[in-house]
Image (cartoon, rainbow, N blue to C red):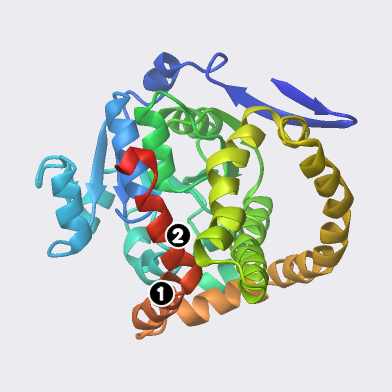
């Protein structure tokens, strides 16, 4: 169907248009090999399995993720295999390793991309920046993308709750003439609420911008700035955290999700409404140049190169843990850990 936003039209696919039964029919002869069991792998693989598709997992033996797959019910030798064996068995290879992991494993996976198979991504990184990653698929396979708009954990949680997480879909290469049906069926199978059309370049540029911006980077920066100002002016850690994070995540964002920002404003005090309406534009004007700088860094490939350079270093995991430890042990998030324990559902 078409969605209209003023003069702009978007192609979307809903569950009503493409029901699960149709998706099963499209993929009835396919073996879906999920390669990687880290961030997106578990949620997508389990959702596909629970929806009745023929799914296997490819992962390195003697690894934490292999053990996690076994704990999740995947059976070695039946539905859980070493990566190369899974790639050989799969007619659709879901390449769900990290971007750095995809670069390292690409020569191995490429050997098993025989004519007619499909190569599936959940991020446009490897293909869009192929000059940097070396990921150049053969011409006789379908190359497709389904990118859930959230973590694999969220995808799985929402599926178990009977809800769906919206996803984008894209076709980079249609070698078989079946790429559209394949990608939409997979999108429905992994538990998407609805699917909206994109391409690999737009997916990766919007995704990298969002992660560095309002989804993760900017929101942490704004949290930290407000918390520090409150603390510097004599507010306690509990008060500063509640006014900065807890009220937003537990009270206000659910209202935004339900009916939009204007509805959330309308359901707050008149004093809060007035302040929000007065101050949102100054915040927009102050931060828009930073977002423009960020988008340009993504568009020119600088962010991709930074990711490749840092994530491929042998000490990446140690440095990552040190940075996460700095966040975790900051006063703001220590206050958050204490506040979460006091929530009614935890008592």
Residue drawn at point x = 37 percent, y = 39 percent: 344
Q: Is residue 132 visible?
A: yes
Q: CA distance from mark 1 to mark 2?
A: 10 Å
Q: Nearer the viewer, residue 243 or 76?
A: 243
Q: Nearer the viewer, residue 113 or 302?
A: 302
| Sequence-first disc among 1 and 2 | 1
| Quarter of the image with the C terminus in it | top left
The percent position of residue 186, horizontal first and vertical second, equals 44, 33
Q: Determine which quarter of the picture holds residue 225.
A: bottom right
Residue drawn at point x = 34 percent, y = 59 percent: 109
Q: Secondary structure at mark 2?
A: helix
Residue drawn at point x = 17 percent, y = 64 percent: 63
Quickly name the residue at label 2.
336
**190 vs 297: above or below:** above
Q: Would residue 148 be found to the left or right of residue 49 on screen?
A: right
The percent position of residue 163, horizontal first and vertical second, equals 45, 26
Q: Determine which quarter of the picture holds residue 218.
A: bottom right
Q: How many marks?
A: 2
Residue count near mark 2 (Cα–Cα under 10 Å), binned few <14, some 14–19, many ≥20: many
Q: Nearer the viewer, residue 310 or 22?
A: 310
**327 vs 21: above or below:** below
Residue count near mark 1 (Cα–Cα under 10 Å), binned few <14, some 14–19, many ≥20: few
Quickly name the residue at label 1.
329
| Quarter of the image with the N terminus in it | top right
The percent position of residue 268, horizontal first and vertical second, equals 72, 35
């Amino acid at each position: 169907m078409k969605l209209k936003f003023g003069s702009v039209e978007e192609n979307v696919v809903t569950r009503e248009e493409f029901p699960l039964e149709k998706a099963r029919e499209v993929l009835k002869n396919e073996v879906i090999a999920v390669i990687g069991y880290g961030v997106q792998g578990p949620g997508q693989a389990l959702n596909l399995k629970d929806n009745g598709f023929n799914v296997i997992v490819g992962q390195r033996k003697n690894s934490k993720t292999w053990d996690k797959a076994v704990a999740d019910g995947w059976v070695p030798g039946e539905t859980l295999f070493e990566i190369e064996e899974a790639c050989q068995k799969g007619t659709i290879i879901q390449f769900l390793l990290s971007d750095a992991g995809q670069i390292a494993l690409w020569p191995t996976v490429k050997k098993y991309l025989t004519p007619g198979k499909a190569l599936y991504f959940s991020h446009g990184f490897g293909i869009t920046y192929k000059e940097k990653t070396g990921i150049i698929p053969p011409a006789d396979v379908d190359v497709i993308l389904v990118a859930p708009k959230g973590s694999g954990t969220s995808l799985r949680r929402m599926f178990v709750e009977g809800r769906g997480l919206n996803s984008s879909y894209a076709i980079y290469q249609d070698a078989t003439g079946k790429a559209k049906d394949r990608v939409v069926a997979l999108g429905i199978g992994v538990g998407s609420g609805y699917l909206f059309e994109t391409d690999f370049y737009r997916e990766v540029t919007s995704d990298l911008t969002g992660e560095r911006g309002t989804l993760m980077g900017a929101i942490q920066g704004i949290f930290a700035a407000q918390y520090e100002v409150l603390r510097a002016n004599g507010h306690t850690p509990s008060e500063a955290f509640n006014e900065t994070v807890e009220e937003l995540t537990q009270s206000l964002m659910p209202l935004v999700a339900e009916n939009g920002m204007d509805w959330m404003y309308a359901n707050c005090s008149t004093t809060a409404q007035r302040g929000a309406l007065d101050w949102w534009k100054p915040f927009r004007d102050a931060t828009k140049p930073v977002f423009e700088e960020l988008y340009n860094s993504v568009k020119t490939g600088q962010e991709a190169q930074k990711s490749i350079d840092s994530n491929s270093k042998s000490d990446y995991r140690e440095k990552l843990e040190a940075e996460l430890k700095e966040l975790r042990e900051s006063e703001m998030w220590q206050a958050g850990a204490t506040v979460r324990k006091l929530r009614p559902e935890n008592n």
